[in-house]
Image (tube, rainbow, N blue to C red):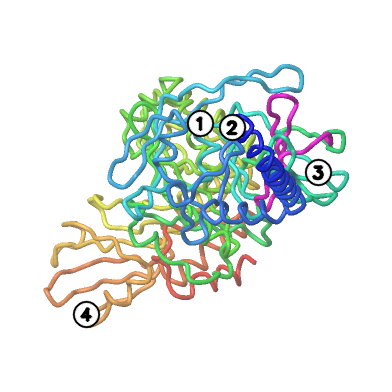
Amino acid sequence: MKKKKNKKHNSKLRPAILLLLLVLLVAIVGFEQYKKMNATNLVSEEYQKLHEDILFYYNGKPIKKQHSFLNYQNQNMIALSFIVEYLPVDFEVVDNQLLIVPYRLDKDIIGEEMVGKFTFADYRLHFPLLRRNGENYLDIALLPLITGMKVITEGDIIQLYSKDFVFYYSFLEDDTVLYYDRACNYQNDTLKAGEKVFIIPEKDNMYRLIDFYGRSGYIKNQINTLIVSKDYKLPLSAAPIKEYYGKLTQTFNHFTNYEAELYYDFPEKINGLDVILPTAFSIAENGNVECRMDKSYVEKLSALSYQVVAVLDNKFDPDLTHKMLTNEQFADNVIEQLDFYLKYYQLSGINLDFENVYLEDKENLTIFVTKLATRIHSSGGIVSVDVTRPNGSAMWSRFIDRKAVAEVVDFVIFMAYDEHWASSKEAGSVASLPWVESGIEAMIELVPKEKLILGIPTYMRAYFVEPQNHSKVLFSKAIASNGLKRILNDVVVSKTFDEQARQNYYEVQNKEGEFMLIWAEDEDSLIARLDLALKYDLVGVADWRYGFEEENYWQICRYKLK
């Protein structure tokens, strides 16, 4: 009886259960169909939400910007923590500067292809860091140079690819459906024909695409619509060389600290001035290069249409210079670093200012300059060298082979000043006109006039002498050309024209009763020097140094030389 009762009860429940299952099945199928029909909208919303926190990709994968990225004054900066996490680089932070050991590409040429492997260099590069929100940030443009990475900043996103990561850069021939998932069930978006995309091969013959707006996804059975090309690479070369008219005009911008006064301010374009030569680099121990350059400085000057040619000096240290010139690896390290900085800072070239060098290093210096010029020229930059008069002292003049060096560099700057030094026991002009002219005549015997630039002093020296014996020098002080008028205020002055020096000459007694002798570097002296550059048809002039000139200095240069 009980069994019959149970069967009767089950028979009543069976239709309800079947109906419930049917309704549930229809709901599931309907929901799935709804998902498919609305996949694009659903994915797009999720995609947009995801990308609110994403600004760039690393090897095709999104990286959250709050941990890794900062845009500061229109410059893209990457967090040091990102470099530590993703890249095997050796670095140290000292005084808010990054000292980093870069990768070096050991190159071999096979036919027209360059192959090679990256190894660590044996020197450290110096770069300023930006400290924000408890994190150190570095200019992202450094990554290709120090790590071999590819950095792509075109479009609305930034893409980083490690040196060994395989990807392609291409255009779409046809409209291409982009799917959110590898199974290609959910449509993300449709990319239009002609769009530029990056293609990342994945396993199972799948391809993931990223466009220049940050949209990413998979493609299905459409690889034949892609025009696959080689890796996309940013150009790494010197800044383009600008044309100039008339004579070439240059100025040395002297500074000793990368943060000091921002190396003087250039508020606007100075008509009559073509090239700025900042004293940015110095050789250091073991083939390292000290760097005092700042990228914003170069960008500002470039925006004002100046060319920037950075100076490398030897600290006037003969022993340090000897170590570098006699060690091929040290010398090669210096050249490699200069080439690096040339590209990174987008300089137009390198200027070499080596002084106080042992005579025995003469041949090695020629070899170094030749190798430097070859490397910088290959990167699109120019090279100039500063020299004194021929046939002077061994360590300040005869240590350099002017003729041999002139054959490999673009310009030779004749430093036609310091006829009388700061420590001179005889008072006199820093550059009397007959002394300068005889120097030019000696130089053009060794250097083609098409490469010779006349150095012009924008300073003078006040020689303090005994009141009753002006031939006895006590000491001297340097005076900027724009500071002479201040020196002459409220003092007893005797002004004459020195026929021998062909300059204005002052005998001054100040309030303290001290006597000074001054050969003026003024407007008259400047015009006479520019006339010499024109007389001998030299390529141009370069003044030492910026900020010392009289107010009308560049107006005169423009009138005479342009």
How packed mark 1 is, by other alpha carbons closer than 10 Å (few <14, some 14-19, many 20 or more), is: many
Q: Which residue is mark 1?
A: 336
Q: How far apart in space, not on screen, are marks 1 and 3 (Cα)?
A: 36 Å
Q: How far apart in space, not on screen, are marks 3 and 4 (Cα)?
A: 76 Å
Task: Please provide percent x and percent y for residue 530.
Answer: 55, 63
Of 158 and 510, nearer the camera is 158
Of 450 and 170, nearer the camera is 170
The first of marks 2 and 4 along the sequence is 2
Q: Which residue is mark 3?
A: 171
Q: Are marks 2 and 1 in contact (CB under 8 Å)?
A: yes
Q: Are marks 1 and 3 in contact (CB under 8 Å)?
A: no
| Residue at the (51%, 28%) spot, across then down | 366
Q: Is residue 331 above or below residue 261?
A: above
Q: How far apart in space, not on screen, are marks 2 and 1 (Cα)?
A: 8 Å
The first of marks 2 and 3 along the sequence is 3
- Helix, strand or loop status at disc 3: strand
Q: Which residues are drawn in magenta? A: 197-222
How packed mark 2 is, by other alpha carbons closer than 10 Å (few <14, some 14-19, many 20 or more), is: some
| Residue at the (49%, 48%) spot, across then down | 64
Q: Is residue 31 above or below residue 117?
A: below
Q: Amino acid at mark 2?
A: Arg
Task: Please provide percent x and percent y for residue 235.
Answer: 66, 42
Q: Quadrant of residue 506?
A: bottom left
- Given this view, does label 1 or label 3 mark the residue nearer the observer? 3
| Residue at the (56%, 64%) spot, across then down | 273
The first of marks 2 and 1 along the sequence is 1
Of 417 and 426, nearer the camera is 417
